[in-house]
Image: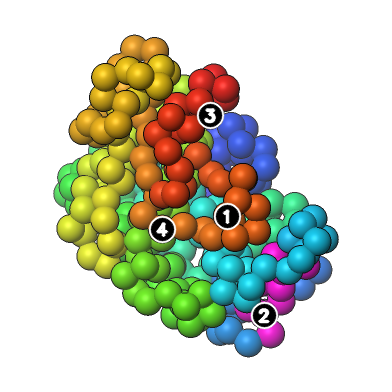
Amino acid sequence: MSVTTPAYARLTAAFPGLRVAEGTPRSGDGWVGAWELAQGGAALAAFTGLDTEELAREYGRPPRPHVAATLALHRYAWAACLLFTVPWFLHRRVPRLPVADVAFHRASGRITVRTREFGCLPGDPAAALPGARVLADEAALREELRAALAEHLAPLFAVFGPRMRRGPHALWAMATDEIAEGLWYVARLTGREEEAVAELTALLPGGTPPYAGGADFRRIAHGANSPGAAGGSAGPPQAGGGCARDRLTCCLFYTISPEQTCASCPRGTESDRIRRRATAA
C-alpha cells in the first residue's frame, strides 16, 4: 500500500465511475499510457478517434477534428487531475506523477498510477518514508500541488494544443477548469462542498502561472430571483444554496448537441445553473 492508497479508495467509493489502482502503468488491451499520448502519433490519434467514433454513433455525424481532440483531452484531464487533488484534499499529500507513471483505460474508467515521490507536511506520519518531500506549510504544499499538476499536464498540452487549435493561455485555463471542477464534483458527492470550494479558491486564486484565471466560485441560492444569484464573491454557500462557477474554457460539446451543455458552460445562464442544481439536489 502506498501513501495515496487511502485517498484513491475513498475517491472510488464516492465516484465508482473512476477506479484507481497502484502498480506499473500498462499499455495495450484498451490501456494507453499518458507517456504514449505525450509522444503524439498513433496513440494520440487513436485516443481522439474514440470520441469521433462514439459521437458519430450517438449523434449521427462525427465531430470536427478539433472538437474531438478537445473532448478527448477534457475526459482525460478531468480524471487525471483528481489523482493529485484528492490526496491533497483528504490527507495533505501531493503525489508526483509524471506522464511515465500513469495509464488510463478509458472504456472502464480505470487508472493505474505509480507513486514514487510525494510532498507532505511535517506532521504527516508518511514524512519519514522514502520519496517524501516535506514542505514547510500549507502554502508550500499548494505550490507543490500546482507544480505536480503542471509537470503532468504540460507534455500533453504540447501535443493536444495543435490538434485543438488552442494556444498556451487557453490550455492552462482549461487546466484551471479541470482542477477546480473535478475536486468540486467529488466533494459534493461526499457532502464537503464548502470545504473544497475554500481549498480550491486558495489553490487557484488567479495569478499563479502557468495557470490562467482562478477557481472563481460564487454563491448562489436555489431561487432564480434570489439576491446575489448573478454574482458574488467566492466563499462558503449560504444555507439552502450552493456554489457555482463559469468555466474559463468551453469543451465545445454544444457544437454536437446545443441543448446538452454542462452546468458550468460559459455559454449558459445563471438561471439554468440554479435549475440544474436544484434538480440534482
Return the x and y of residue 142 as percentages of the image width and height.
26, 50
Q: How crowded is mark 2: few (under 14 residues within 10 Å), some or many (20 or more)?
A: few
> Does the magenta run of residues contain 76?
no
Residue at 62% x, 32% y is 13
Mark 3 is surrounded, within 10 Å at the Cα level, by few (under 14), some (14 to 19) or many (20 or more) other residues, namely: some
Q: Position of residue 34 (x, y in %)?
A: 57, 71
Give the magenta-colored segment's residue range. 42-53
What residue does disc 1 label?
A: 254
Which is more N-terminal, label 4 or label 1?
A: 4
Q: Could you give the CA–CA distance between mark 2 and mark 3, rounded to whole angstroms? A: 35 Å
Tags 1 and 3 touching, CB below 8 Å: no
Instruction: Give the residue number, with chain letter if any, for mark 4.
Output: 249
Residue 136 located left or right of residue 51: left
Judging depth in this view, the residue of 118 and 197 nearest the camera is 197
Q: Mark 2 points at which residue?
A: 45
How far apart are the alpha carbons under marks 4 and 3? 20 Å
Element type at mark 1:
helix
Kind of residue indicated by mark 2: Ala
Secondary element under disc 2, as helix, strand or loop, is: helix
Q: Is residue 108 above or below residue 168?
A: above
Residue that carries the numbered disc 3 in the rendered image:
276
* Three-letter amino acid code of the residue under disc 1: Tyr
137 or 209: nearer the viewer: 209
At numbered mark 4, what does the secondary structure look like: helix, strand or loop?
loop
Work out whether mark 1 precedes mark 3 in sequence or the reverse, and give the earlier one: 1
Residue 87 lies, in percent from the top left, at 43, 44
Q: Distance between the residues labelled 1 and 2?
A: 22 Å
Other-residue count near label 4 (Cα within 10 Å), few / some / many at <14 / 14–19 / ≥20: some
